[in-house]
Amino acid sequence: MDLAIRNVTIVDGTGAPARVGDVGISNGRIVTVAETADPALDGAERTVDGTGLMLCPGFVDPHTHYDAQLLWDPTASPSSVHGVTTVIAGNCGFTLAPLNPGDGDYVRRMMAKVEGMPLAALEEGIDWDWETFADYLARFDGNLAVNAGFLVGHCALRRKVMGTDAVGSQPTDEQLRDMEELLAESIRAGGLGFSTTRARTHSDGDGEPVASRWAEEPELLALAEVVSQHPGTTLEFASDGCLDGFDDDEVQFMIRFSRAGNRPLNWNVLTVDSHAPERYRNQLAAMDTAAAAGARVVALTMPVIVGMNMSFLTYCALNMMPDWGDILALPVPERIEKLSDPGTRRFMEERAASPDAGVFARLTGWSTYVIGDTFSEANEGLRGRRVGDIAAERGTGAFDTLLDIVIADDLRTVLWPGATDADPESWELRRQAWQHPSVMLGGSDAGAHLDRMQGANYPTRFLADCLRGRKLTTVEDAVRMMTTVPAELFGLRDRGVIREGAHADLVLFDPDVVDSEMLSMVDDLPGGTERLFAGSVGVRSVLVSGVEVVRDGRPTEARPGTIIRSGVDTDTVTAS
């Protein structure tokens, strides 16, 4: 026996009641789960006293964009310190492979735009000298702290086959056949399936719709059919309906897409807001319609409100407000002039409050914004204060006050929005959504939007909320939703559960204090760029295949992680 964890409270991932017992690990697998002292554990090479601690399966994050970061950071920071042992990347149609020679610049600029990855980090942290999906995956073998699975992105397939014509054109019959074969080749190399995007928010570094947005339905269904021919695969997509609610045509497309691949189709992200209950009901009804039609469509949703900051200087979610994009894309002097104009301000405020804002309407609580870093004498003393309080002192409206502050800083002010969906009614809707058969926890976007958003810490925040906060569900059910549920959707073999024979991917934590640290900016990316970071609290140990990759909230140097390859590490999960 390599490791024995004794007298620990076991939360096994199935939703069963927690129980005190012993767990034994050998050769990367759980070999003993005993509720009474097992003599076989007496001779273990290492023994941990788990008294007062909880042990659960490692968390599975189903929606990350660690495609680039893992190349310079094998620990998947900060996900791993929050107990995540398996990440799924390659989402939303965006992957770094397959790659044509010379296309690195285009892909870097696209990823910087659509996923907020600092361009300097992409230039300095990666050498970009692979071509095939197999070449790309080979970079990770033996060099991962966590397990990682990668979908094959539609944008990369189109660019590899169609070159610059991937944007603005339809493929010839021959090009479509080449895309089908390239997808099949990439899946045979280990790709977990196929991802795509049709969302209006996804544009490349040139401002054009990304390649997959030009695809027509026959192309998408043909590629889904390829997925159906390979075991252990899945489908994922993003669309306008994921943001605003689905119309009938999109519901029917999701049904055809899932059925063509005979695989579950998951999408990101179901945003729950009591101020927009019609969108919530529409999106859940779409899942029910799909299920009734013999398809499986699964919505991802977050169990916490993700911390994020905003800026009127650099590209962020504010650019997605209806008709704000053109204003915020102006050169800074012209942008300041526009933002100073009372008529423009009223127009922007009205458009942000319109139904066209969709999910981004949750960012319109201007009075609840908290001022972060400031850069001018005029704004001295405002850091940490609410805009509503400042507005009351000045006798001005909240939106006008916010714009006055950022203009005084030449737009550099860091803003921390107070979301409108933190009310008790929204939390009750979330509690209900978690129990829906077509809803799964996830959607952290970890590895993306690095200086603007930090969702990787959701497991510890959710555990803290269940144990000592709102207590909207039990800790057993919270663990089940973050382990067994995503593991089963992706068909992950022997993961997401504590039982004999399962992989020893485990999290040992102190239930009295488990939580996330506050967000802060750290300067640790290639190219000297910054990102938002939050460490964990109360996470004693994270094991991957029985090897400790996190100790007392800090990464170790161990690299026991593996690439999750379709059909090798996954079983087939069908649409029906």
Image: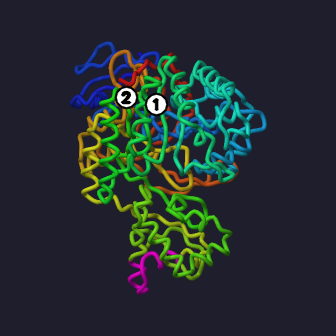
Q: Position of residue 132 (x, y in %)?
A: 69, 26
Residue indicated by mark 2: 295
Where is 300 relative to 358, above or below? above
Tell which of 168 and 436 is nearer to you: 168
Q: Which residue is rendered at x = 60% and y = 21% of the image?
A: 184
Residue 26 visible in the current orientation: yes
For badge 2, the amino acid type reads: Ala
| Mark sitting on residue 36 | none
Label 1: state its secondary structure.
Answer: helix
Label 1 neighbour load within 10 Å: few <14, some 14-19, many 20+? many
Label the magenta part by its dominant secondary structure. helix
Q: Position of residue 55 (x, y in %)?
A: 33, 32
What is the quadrant of residue 123 in the picture? top right
For the C terminus, the quadrant is top left
Q: Secondary structure at mark 2?
A: loop
Query: In this picture, is 365 found above or below 277?
Result: below
Q: Nearer the viewer, residue 97 or 326?
A: 326
Residue picked out by circle 1: 257
Looking at the rendered structure, the kind of residue marked 1 is Phe
Magenta-tinted stretch: 389-405
Asked if residue 558 lies left or right of residue 422, the reply is: right
